[in-house]
């Protein structure tokens, strides 16, 4: 599994590097969360029939992590590598933020922060009203939770007892301009969610087994469920880990050596990317 | 119009269990009565319009037909990005019902007025905009909105609008409606100010100025053909709206005139790039802002004399 996770990060980096754009660090922090949902099938889906009636719904509210999601969807069989390689190139439907309706496996258009959880509560409410069993999963950034709508949705989900809703907060503790602690600190995420009436679990967001256990946990106590996933922004390449400067940046020549060494990328692969640019 | 909305909504809730009335603490006693009969179809989101609009898009993704009802100022302004990103970009089957449009919240002042909503919303792709002028027409608009599989904004008034259609209302989606025929000029109007226009026109008619009055009840898609026809018939065109003259129906008419090289004069009557002022009854606030029947009468008479 370790090798698979490294391969995913390698793919994420190479796809972004070939078009000279990407929120690489934001994508790296959610790889294990998506792996647990899609590759370990904690999410119910059929990649050959993306609109399957009784599928679970997943929304990437922090849309800028799109490359991680596209790479996972590719691995899960929603589309092939050629489709993934079209990322941000003319004629492609794969952009820097997920968009419906042309990408198999994408349920919602996101990008502007603070929309995904509200979309998710609407979906979860519809499922409840219809007596359906499917779940709705929404992955948010911790910085994203500075948007007021997120808390409107949190209140709503608790009041309407949406226990078919699972929110995962990618707690990488860093936003574009610095640490959350410096910009808009939240003393305790756990207490905050508990006080809003949610069921809360904290987990190492890079521990796939621990994530699997939480996703498989029965939730029938009439509360929405939030997983606070403690992650490292930029996880997988030492020089970008926990460094806000890498929110929207690709490596220069010198820095590239660390990427190629740690992600096991060959010179030939880098040359192929350069040709593409 | 509120009573008419409630009646129409009641019919739809009864007819289709997927219709959901989405309130943000914005209902009345009638809504409470309806909620008792349809507990699973009336959802109060509390005072949080943005979550409500996005959640409505989520409901629509799962086959529901949400009717999102609140004061139009809170819908069109506060929730604009949610209307754009979640409802219009994703082309969801959400009905946005803006209540108390124009200056209808006449005692509460400018925060509650909606006088730039047409300008803001008509630039959104995928959105149909309906603007009924009377309770009967509102009923037709609500049923038409239900039949459309996509986003709709209904710009409705409040509670004391006059019924201008004596028998059956002739609403047709996407088509303007000639309310009066005349040969000295054409007045295009929309929404509840139509009754002021009709009063002004009657006085003008008594004084020998025969005017055509056209009700624009579908603001988007805009009935261009109707403008072209009126411009062939009359050389002076007026637009009257409870809205800024920038970006309202007058601007839509101006586009058609320019694009078709029509040789007419256009006089736009509305708020002259200003917020409305004053407090009082709806009629009084219209008067303070020079949008009541007497002012409309004077502007038109001066032009035609």
Image (cartoon, coloured by chain):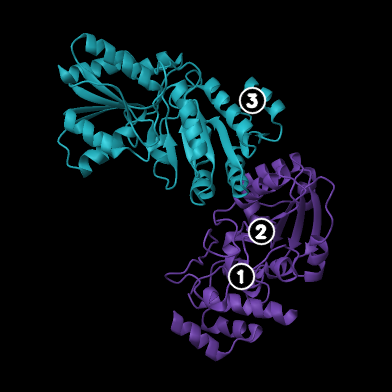
Residue at the spot of label 1: A78
Of all chains, the one bearing label 2 is A
Chain A pictured colour = purple
Label 3 environment density (alpha carbons within 10 Å; few <14, some 14–19, many ≥20): some
- Quick check: do tags 2 and 1 share a chain? yes
Give the CA separation, mark 2 to mark 1: 14 Å
Q: Which residue is mark 3?
A: B31
Instruction: Tell me whether circle 3 and circle 2 mark residues in contact (CB < 8 Å).
Output: no
State the CA–CA distance, disc 3 to disc 2: 33 Å
Q: Secondary structure at mark 3?
A: helix
Q: Which chain is cyan?
A: B
Disc 1 to disc 3, C-alpha distance: 44 Å
Task: Name the residue at 85% across, 47% down.
Answer: A221
- Of the pair A35 and B168, the residue shown nearer to us: B168
Q: Is residue A54 at all visible to an observer of this figure?
A: yes
Residue at position x 62%, y 63% from top? A50
On the question of residue A183 being in view, the answer is: no
Q: Are marks 1 and 3 on the same chain?
A: no
Q: Disc 2, disc 1: CB below 8 Å?
A: no
- Tell me which corner region of the image, top left, top right, bottom left or bottom right, holds residue A248: bottom right
Front residue of A216 and B151: B151
């Amino acid at each position: 599994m370790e090798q698979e996770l490294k391969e995913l990060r390698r793919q994420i980096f190479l796809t972004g590097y070939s078009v000279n754009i990407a929120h690489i660090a934001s994508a790296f922090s959610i790889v294990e969360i998506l792996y647990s949902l899609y590759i370990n099938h904690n999410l119910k889906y059929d990649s050959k029939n993306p609109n399957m009636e009784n599928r679970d719904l997943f929304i990437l509210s922090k849309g800028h992590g799109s490359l991680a999601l596209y790479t996972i969807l590719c691995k899960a069989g929603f589309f092939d590598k050629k489709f993934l390689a079209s990322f941000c190139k003319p004629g492609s439907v794969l952009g820097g933020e997920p968009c419906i309706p042309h990408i198999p496996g994408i349920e919602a258009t996101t990008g502007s922060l603070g929309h995904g959880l509200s979309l998710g509560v609407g979906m979860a409410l519809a499922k409840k009203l219809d007596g359906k069993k499917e779940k709705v999963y929404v992955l948010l950034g911790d910085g994203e939770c500075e948007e007021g709508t997120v808390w409107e949705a949190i209140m709503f989900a608790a009041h309407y007892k949406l226990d078919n809703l699972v929110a995962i907060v990618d707690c990488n503790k860093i936003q574009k301009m610095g640490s959350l602690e410096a910009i808009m600190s939240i003393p305790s995420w756990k207490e905050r969610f508990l006080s809003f009436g949610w069921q809360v679990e904290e987990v190492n967001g890079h521990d796939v087994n621990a994530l699997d256990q939480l996703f498989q946990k029965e939730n029938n106590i009439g509360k929405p469920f939030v997983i606070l996933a403690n992650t490292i922004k930029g996880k997988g390449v030492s020089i970008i880990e926990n460094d806000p400067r890498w929110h929207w940046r690709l490596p220069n020549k010198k820095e590239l050596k660390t990427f190629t060494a740690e992600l096991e990328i060959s010179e030939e692969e880098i040359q192929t990317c350069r040709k593409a640019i | 119009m509120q009573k008419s909305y409630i009646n129409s909504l009641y019919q739809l809730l009864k007819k289709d269990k997927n219709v959901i009335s989405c309130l943000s603490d914005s209902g009345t006693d009638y809504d409470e009565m309806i909620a008792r009969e349809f507990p699973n179809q009336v959802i109060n989101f509390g005072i949080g319009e943005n979550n409500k609009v996005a959640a409505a898009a989520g409901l629509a993704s799962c086959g529901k037909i949400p009717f999102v009802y609140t004061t139009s100022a809170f819908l069109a302004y506060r929730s604009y990005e949610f209307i754009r990103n979640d409802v219009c970009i994703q082309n969801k089957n959400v009905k946005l019902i803006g209540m108390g449009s124009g200056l209808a919240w006449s005692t509460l002042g400018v925060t509650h007025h909606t006088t730039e909503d047409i300008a803001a919303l008509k630039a959104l792709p995928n959105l149909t905009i309906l603007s009924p002028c009377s309770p009967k027409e509102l009923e037709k608009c609500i049923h038409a909105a239900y039949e459309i599989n996509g986003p709709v904004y209904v710009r409705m008034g409040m509670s004391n609008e006059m019924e201008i259609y004596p028998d059956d209302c002739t609403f047709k989606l996407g088509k303007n409606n000639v309310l009066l025929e005349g040969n000295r000029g054409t007045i295009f109007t929309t929404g509840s100010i139509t009754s002021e226009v009709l009063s002004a026109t009657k006085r003008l008619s008594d004084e020998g100025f025969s005017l055509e009055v056209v009700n624009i009840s579908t603001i988007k898609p805009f009935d261009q053909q109707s403008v072209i026809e009126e411009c062939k018939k009359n050389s002076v065109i007026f637009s009257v709206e409870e809205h800024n003259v920038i970006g309202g129906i007058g601007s839509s008419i101006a586009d058609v005139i320019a694009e078709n090289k029509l040789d007419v004069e256009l006089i736009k009557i509305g708020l002259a790039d200003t917020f409305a002022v004053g407090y009082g009854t709806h009629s009084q606030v219209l008067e303070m802002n020079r949008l009541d029947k007497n002012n409309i009468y004077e502007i038109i008479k001066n032009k035609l004399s």
